[in-house]
Image (spheres, rainbow, N blue to C red):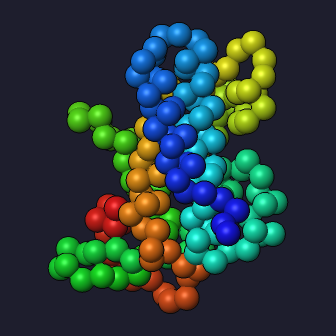
Amino acid sequence: MAEYDISFAVKLASIAAEVEEQDPMAYDARRTAVYLGRLSVEISLKALLEKAGVSFSSIRPRSHDLRGLLSDLGECEVQVEIATGEMQWCLASCVRSAVIDFGVGHVPIGELIEADDPTISKYPNEIRYGATVIDYNPILVSQMAVVLANWAQSHWNTIRVATTTPNPSINTDAAR
């Protein structure tokens, strides 16, 4: 049985988005959406790594390091459909270019996961505890979790530890 459950990550992302939508101005709702969104991202990344064949003993030391987990995903690959309709292998780090689409604006989830801002509350402890949580807008965090969970589900059956040299000419935007 898998240690990390992608269905759990999907549900957390959904709940984070729902909480944010229902009461976007309430502090406790904002804090909940941020925490559940980041927790969903953590579990999605760990589930993807485990599904790819990375051992639990290799994943576990990353703890809550979302940036490190995303980096580890770069050692995996997924099959993607390219413009010609063919399927080719691409580094799973292409997930960085999956976007939160706000119609007029698009935010790549990799930028949010890898953001290194010392003013942001450190996940998870500084979000779970304390009087003040400082993070990106909860809608960004919850949607980041939704986009990643959806990407994980769509690539679930082809993810593996990289065994080939992926085609560098693949447009990673098309690899979503």
Q: Is residue 44 left or right of residue 105?
A: right
Which residue is located at x 45 percent, y 31 percent? Answer: 17
- Vertical arrangement, residue 39 with respect to residue 174, above or below: above
Q: Is residue 135 visible?
A: yes
Q: Is residue 114 left or right of residue 130?
A: left
Which residue is located at x 66 percent, y 66 percent? Answer: 2
Q: Nearer the viewer, residue 15 or 81?
A: 15
Residue 96, percent from left and from top: 47, 56
Furthest-bottom residue in this view: 164
Residue 114, percent from left and from top: 59, 48
- Vertical arrangement, residue 33 with respect to residue 83, above or below: above
Q: Nearer the viewer, residue 13 or 87?
A: 13
Residue 116, percent from left and from top: 64, 40
> Picture quarter containing residue 32?
top right
User: Looking at the figure, which quarter contains the N terminus?
Assistant: bottom right
Which residue is located at x 45 percent, y 77 percent? Answer: 158
> Picture quarter containing residue 55?
bottom right
Residue 135, percent from left and from top: 60, 26
Which residue is located at x 35 percent, y 82 percent? Answer: 88
User: Looking at the figure, which quarter contains the C terminus?
Assistant: bottom left
Q: Is residue 20 left or right of residue 135?
A: left
